[in-house]
Amino acid sequence: GAVVSQHPSRVICKSGTSVKIECRSLDFQATTMFWYRQFPKKSLMLMATSNEGSKATYEQGVEKDKFLINHASLTLSTLTVTSAHPEDSSFYICSARDPDHNNEQFFGPGTRLTVL
Amino acid sequence: QKEVEQNSGPLSVPEGAIASLNCTYSDRGSQSFFWYRQYSGKSPELIMSIYSNGDKEDGRFTAQLNKASQYVSLLIRDSQPSDSATYLCAVMGRYSTLTFGKGTMLLVSP
């Protein structure tokens, strides 16, 4: 099946710093990737849709200047959390749409961000 | 606003029993439906997709779709303790985005 990787799996940073998370589709080309955030015992919340070669589409209430998304190639999208604050601590998960599998979305393993 | 509703559970079943998970959705125009399994602290794993009315079987899993009733279900036969997880129903909308339900926690006791 389609494989999506994420790096790092876990990161702890100080308040005010920026953190970059990478999402890669390993065995397929993904023109579209998605970034989600999940708080404990809550469901997944879509943050933005990342399209290769164009600007990301952000969901309502998600600050695009705080959560920078770059999708520079068909296998890599990055999410940068800028000037992180403790309330940004969450589980960030990316997914990639596989055009060879009915456009089904396959998730990366997630990145647990803790901002001190 | 598009909504996907699931009973949060927990749904408790004994090992070997059938677990039945249900989901309703509000967008009548939705065409693609998915079930994901999420273990605690892990990311979701796609286990079933269904696109047309009726049943779709894959091993111990059967997905059922009734578009007229806007209802999707997942049956797990011969439930195992390793099936204990949260099951997320997802509905594909515009631009291939997924709207997730809050998930149903399934507990399978040995």
Image (cartoon, coloured by chain):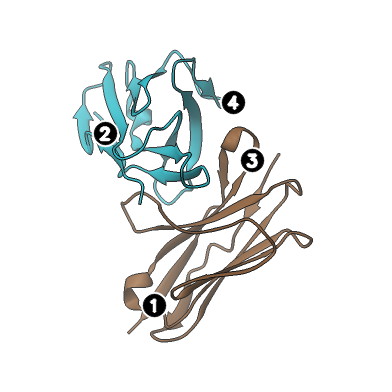
Q: Residues within 10 Å of mark 3 (few under 14, many from 20)?
A: some
Q: CA–CA distance between discs 2 and 4?
A: 24 Å
Q: Are marks 3 and 1 on the same chain?
A: yes
User: Mark 4 Cα within 10 Å, few/some/many (few <14, many 20+)?
Assistant: few
Secondary structure, mark 2, is strand
Quickly name the residue at label 3: B93
Q: Chain of mark 1?
A: B
Residues behind callouts 3 and 2 on a single chain: no
Q: CA distance from mark 1 to mark 2?
A: 32 Å
**Is label 4 in a helix, a strand or a loop?**
loop
Which residue is rendered at x = 48% and y = 23% of the image?
Answer: A51
Which mark is nearer the camera, 3 or 1? 3
Q: Circle 4 sits on which residue?
A: A60
Question: Looking at the rendering, which quadrant does residue A31 occupy?
Answer: top left
* Image spot of residue B39 (x, y percent): 35, 59
Q: Which residue has dot 2 on it? A: A114
Q: Name the element at disc 3.
A: loop
Above or below — where is B33 with respect to A71?
below
Disc 3 chain ID: B
Question: Viewer-nearest of labels 3 and 4?
Answer: 3
Image colour for chain B is: brown
Residue B56 coordinates in the image, percent (x, y): 57, 68
Kind of residue at badge 3: Gly
How far apart marks 3 and 1 lie (CA) works out to 32 Å
Per the image, the residue denoted by label 1 is: B108
Residue type, numbered disc 2: Thr
Classify the position of the N terminus of chain B by image quarter.
top right
Residues at circles 3 and 1 in contact by the CB criterion of under 8 Å: no
> Residue B81's quadrant in the figure?
bottom left
Mark 1 closeness class: few <14, some 14–19, many ≥20 residues within 10 Å? many
